[in-house]
Image (cartoon, grey):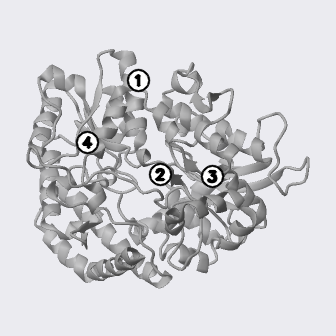
Amino acid sequence: MRTRTGGRASARLLLAAAMLLLSGACTGTSSLSGPESSSAGGAQRQVEGAKEGEARRLTYWAELNGNAGSIVPTFQQVPFFQEWQRQTGVELTFIQPPANQARESLNVLLASGDLPDMIEFEWDTFPGGPDKAIADGYILRLNEVIEKHAPNLRKYLSEHPEIDKQVKTGSGSYYVFPFIRGDDRLLTFQGPIVRKDWLDELGLPIPETIGQWHETLKAFKERKGAAAPLTFLGVPHPLFGLEGGAFIGAFGVKNGFYLEEGRVKFGPLEPGYKEFLSLFRQWYDEGLIDRNIATVDTKTMDANVISGRSGASIWNAGAGIGTWQPFMQAKDPKARLAAAPYPVLNKGERPKFGQRSFDYVGTGGVAISANSPNVEEAVRMLDYGYGEEGHLLFNFGIEGQSYEMIDGYPTYTKLILDNPDKLAPSQALAMYTRASYFGAFVQDGRYIEQYYLLPEQRQAMDIWSDTDAAKHRMPRVSLSEKENAELSAIMQDVETLVDEVSLKIILGVEPLSSFDDCVAELRTLGIGRAIEIQEKALAVALKG
C-alpha cells in the first residue's frame, strides 16, 4: 500500500463535503447512533474496574465494514459488537459516518470539539501525523495508560519489540490500540482476479503480460458482452484499487513512494507512470475499463462481477473470490474465478510490485479522545482484544455459535462456512468476528486456514505472493511531528494533483502530454523535499 500522509481531496472538496455533512449528514449520523444498549442477554463479565452490576456506557466512532453493512445497517445489529459489549460489561453508543465518507465526517467531528471516547481511524494519515493529533488535543498519548491499565497489550508488545517500534511515533508515543497481523500468511491477500470459465470458453490462458490482458479484456467485451470488462475500486480516490501495483507495476513504478536500489522513488515522477497512463487512456477509450472508474465502490464492484458485467477485477481472496464465486455458481454452476499474476510487460518477467502488507500498517487502530471522561474504562475495553478471551472473540467469534474448540483448535462452525441464511463466509465472518478486517486485536493465522475454503483462494495466495514487492516497499518509518507536518502539507497537494491529472488523462479530458506539466508542478510543490524527508527517515530506520 502507498505511504499515506494526509487527506487526498483538495481543499475545496473537503470544504464542500464538510458543508454537506454540517447541513444534513450529521443529523443522519445521530439517528443511527443514539443511545443503544446491547441486546445480548446472559451474565456479563465486567471489565476490571467496573462495579458489579454496573454497565459502563462509552461512545465509539467508526465506519461499519462493508461486508457487515451489506447485511445490517448499524453496529448495534452486528452480533460481534453485541458480544463484545456483553463480555466486557461496557455499553457502547456508536457514532457511524456514512459509507465511504469517514474522512470527511471525521473532519467535521474534530472541528466540533465534541469527541467520542474512542475513534477508530487511520490516524497515520492525520495531517502532521499522530503526534500532531496528540499536540492538537484530539487524541490521548497512551504510554502512561497502557502501562497502568492495558496489561494484555503491554505484554504482547514487550514480547514483540519489532512491532512495538512500529506502533509508536517518532517521538516514542503510543497513539492507538493497534490492529496487528500476527502471521506472515496474512500479509498478502489481494491481486488480479479473472473469470476462468470465460477464459476456457474463449480458449485464452490466464493473462500474465499487458498484451495478454489487452487481448483478454477485448474478448470479454466483444465475445462475452461485458460492459465493464475490468472493474476496480475508484474510491476513496481515483485508482485506489491499483495501489498494490497492479498494471502500474508492469512499467516499473507504483503510484506512491517505493525503494529502488536503496533510494526512495516517487512513481509519478518516473517515465513508467506516464506509460501506464497512456495504456489506461487507450483501454478506457476502447471500453475495456469500467466507465465509472472514479466512483466504483465495493458494492458496485460486487454487483459488476457477480452479474457478469465485469470479467476481471483487483480485489481480495476473501471478499472477492470467496464472496463472488458462491453467488455466481448459484446461478451458473460452471462459473469460476481464478487469480492471475500481477501483470508484467514481457513473458517470463517477475512482477516488481504486488500487494504486501506489514505487521502493522496504521489502519484500523483505535484512539482515545484527549477529553474523554472515561479513559480508564476505554483502555480496559480496548485491551480486552489482546487477552486470551478477547483474541478468540475477535478472531473466531462466539463459542458455540460461530466456532467450537476442537482439540485445542478454534474451528469455525457452519454458521460461518456454510451459513443457513446463504451468507458468504466473508459476510458471516464480518457479522460474528473482526478477523477479516480491522480493530484493536492481533489477527490469528488460524482464521485464514479455514476462511479460504476454495482451492482458488489458496492458489491466489501463492500466485499473488510471487513478486518482488518486499524488496521495493517503503518500510514503516518514524517522523518527528515537524517532519510529519511538512510531509503531510506537501503530499496533500501532490497526491491531489496526481489523482486529478491522472483521471483527466485516462478519461481523455486532457492530452497525455499534460502530464509533463504535472511533473514540473510536482517539483514546484516540493516533491523533492518530500523524498528527502523519507530518505532521512529511512536512513535512521536502517541504523536502528
Q: Amino acid at mark 1?
A: Phe
Mark closer to the chain start, 3 or 2: 3
According to the image, label 1 marks what residue? 327
Pointers 4 and 2 in contact (CB under 8 A)?
no
Determine which of the numbered discs, if any, sits on residue 100 in the image.
Answer: 2
Mark 2 Cα within 10 Å, few/some/many (few <14, many 20+)? some
- Circle nearer the viewer, 2 or 1: 1
The part of the image, by quadrant, that contains residue 370 is: bottom right
Q: Earlier in the sequence, mark 3 or mark 1?
A: 3
Residue type of the residue flagged with mark 3: Thr
State the residue at coordinates (67%, 65%): 115
Residue 416 screen position, x and y as percent: 55, 27
Q: Is residue 331 above or below residue 348?
A: above
Choose the circle earlier in sequence order: 2 or 1.
2
Q: CA distance from mark 3 to mark 1?
A: 32 Å
Where is mark 3, residue-wise?
Answer: 29
**What residue sits 29% from the left and 77% below the top?**
531
User: Considering depth in this image, is 470 or 20 the residue closer to the camera?
Assistant: 470
Q: Residues within 10 Å of mark 1 (few under 14, many from 20)?
A: some
Q: Label 3 vs label 2: CA separation? A: 13 Å
Q: Is residue 96 left or right of residue 304?
A: right
Q: Position of residue 391 (x, y in %)?
A: 63, 45
Residue at the location (82% across, 53% down)? 56
* Disc ID at residue 533: none
Per the rendering, the mark at residue 290 is 4
Q: Eyeballing the image, is 3 above or below 285?
A: below
- Looking at the rendered image, the quarter that the N terminus falls into is bottom left
Q: Could you give the CA–CA distance between mark 4 and mark 2, rounded to whole angstroms? A: 19 Å
The local secondary structure at tag 1 comes to: helix
Q: Nearer the viewer, mark 4 or mark 1?
A: 1
SS class, disc 4: loop
